[in-house]
Amino acid sequence: MFIIHGWDGYPEEGWFPWLKKELESRGFSVQVPSMPHPENPIIDDWVSFLKDSVGEPDENTYFIGHSIGCQTTLRYLETLEGRVVGNVVLVAPWMTLSQEVWDEGEETVATGNPWVETPINFEKVKNMARRFICIFSEDDPAVPYEENKRIFEEKLNAKIITTTGKGHFREEDGVQELPSALQAVLELAEE
């Protein structure tokens, strides 16, 4: 199982250590790779790094992505040929970002634009995993909830879990534990 952090994230951030410990206590093997140059994530670099980290995936390989880590996971799945991984949990996934993000300045726009503008072959991605679960917070300042919820429901037939008061599920939002992600993984593992 792989937990993929987001833009400006790191393996020991927020809820990642808690979830890793909870999953390991239930017998799962969990890795939280430190993605390259997290302050300036580049699609090819992140997808290549994830590919190297995973090695040969199989039906027991699960992914939990956060924010841009969700896109990284989807773009990684898009590169697979004839292989199917287990299941995917996406926390604060996005294909569109709020105006608040774009208002952060030129550097943010330069980093974020390729992730928004480079299409994903969702039809292929959908066939690379058994199931997808997306976890959103209605008050996420970065991710327009209704628009992104609709995209993931329509494109991946994802089960949607909606919370509130979690913001973008970051440490600064006060999110140190994420029971909804643990429950999602356990639900998928029982199928």
Image (cartoon, rainbow, N blue to C red):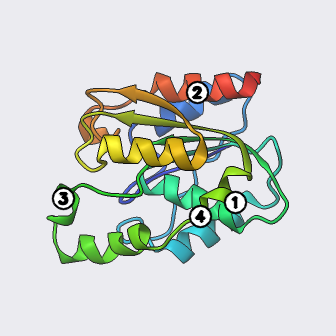
Alpha-carbon span between mark 3 and mark 2: 30 Å
* Residue 190 spot, x, y in % from top left: 75, 21
Depth-wise, is mark 3 or mark 1 nearer the camera? 1
Q: Which residue is mark 4?
A: 75
Q: Which residue is mark 3?
A: 99
Residue at x 42% of width, y 68% of height: 115
Residue kind at label 2, given as amino acid type = Ala
Residue kind at label 1, given as amino acid type = Lys
Neighbor class of circle 3 (other Cα within 10 Å; few <14, some 14-19, many 20+) is few
Neighbor class of circle 1 (other Cα within 10 Å; few <14, some 14-19, many 20+) is some
Alpha-carbon span between mark 1 and mark 4: 10 Å
Specify which label sits upstream in the sequence, 3 or 1. Answer: 3
- Left or right of 80 in this view: 14: left
Specify which label sits upstream in the sequence, 4 or 3. Answer: 4
Neighbor class of circle 2 (other Cα within 10 Å; few <14, some 14-19, many 20+) is many
**Is residue 170 at least partly visible in the picture?**
no
Q: Is residue 77 above or below residue 135?
A: below
* Residue 29 spot, x, y in % from top left: 72, 38
Question: What label sits on residue 184 in the rendered view?
Answer: 2
Specify which label sits upstream in the sequence, 4 or 2. Answer: 4
Neighbor class of circle 4 (other Cα within 10 Å; few <14, some 14-19, many 20+) is many
**Is residue 79 at least partly visible in the picture?**
yes
Q: Which residue is mark 1?
A: 124
Residue kind at label 3, given as amino acid type = Gln
Specify which label sits upstream in the sequence, 3 or 2. Answer: 3
Quadrant (top left/top right/bottom left/bottom right) for the N terminus = top right
Residue at x 39% of width, y 47% of height: 148
Question: What label sits on residue 104 in the rendered view?
Answer: none
Alpha-carbon span between mark 3 and mark 1: 30 Å
Alpha-carbon span between mark 1 and mark 2: 23 Å
The answer to the question of whether label 3 and label 2 lie on touching residues, with beta carbons closer than 8 A, is: no
